Amino acid sequence: TKAKVTAKELQKYNMIYVHIKGPDEFGHDGDALGKKQNIEKIDSDFFGTLLRELGISNAVIVVSGDHSTPCTKKSHTDDPVPLLISSKILKNNRFQRFTESYAKTGDVETIKGSDVLKKTLEIINSKNKL
């Protein structure tokens, strides 16, 4: 599985980029329930497996999208995409949902996609915790 391959590769590398396309297809189809269920499956199957393989203590997980594909539009849009940075070294913030609407008001604010890695490293290294 992608999760097991990712866990194995993380034994050699500090960081791995993994692209999971599933939710995008449901957005193009306008299938909100399918998109929700697919994201839940990714959460349990990919992230659940990855965390079991790696353990949580040293992991910093960054989850985002390369673009928004709202089911109502059935197309890519320029809406902000959610950005989740999770680690035991970061404190919790007030947000409990991973959605486009929460992304507009999140603690990281709106940043360019090309700045995601830089911002993530700043947060981790400066202890400017979310």
Image (cartoon, rainbow, N blue to C red):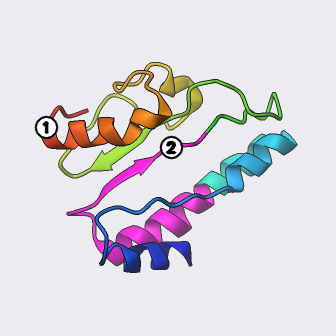
Q: Is residue 9 visible?
A: yes
Which amino acid does the dot numbered 2 rest on?
Answer: Ser
Furthest-right residue in view? 29
Q: Nearer the viewer, residue 78 or 101?
A: 78
Which residue corresponds to the image point at 50% horizontal and 20% vertical from the top-left?
Answer: 104
Magenta highlight range: 40-66
**Residue corresponding to mark 1:** 127
How far across and down, in percent of the image, does residue 80 sit?
Answer: 56, 26
The picture quadrant where one finds residue 7 is: bottom left
Residue at 29% over, 31% down? 93
Can residue 96 be spotted in the picture? Answer: no
Q: Position of residue 14 (x, y in %)?
A: 28, 64
Q: Is residue 46 magenta?
A: yes
Front-most of residues 64 and 56: 64
Q: Residue at x 86, y 44 (%)?
A: 29
Above or below — where is 82 with respect to 53? above
14 relative position to 43: left or right: left
Residue 4 against residue 63 in the figure, above or below: below
Q: Residue furthest left?
A: 126
State which quarter of the image contains the C terminus.
Answer: top left
Kind of residue at badge 1: Lys
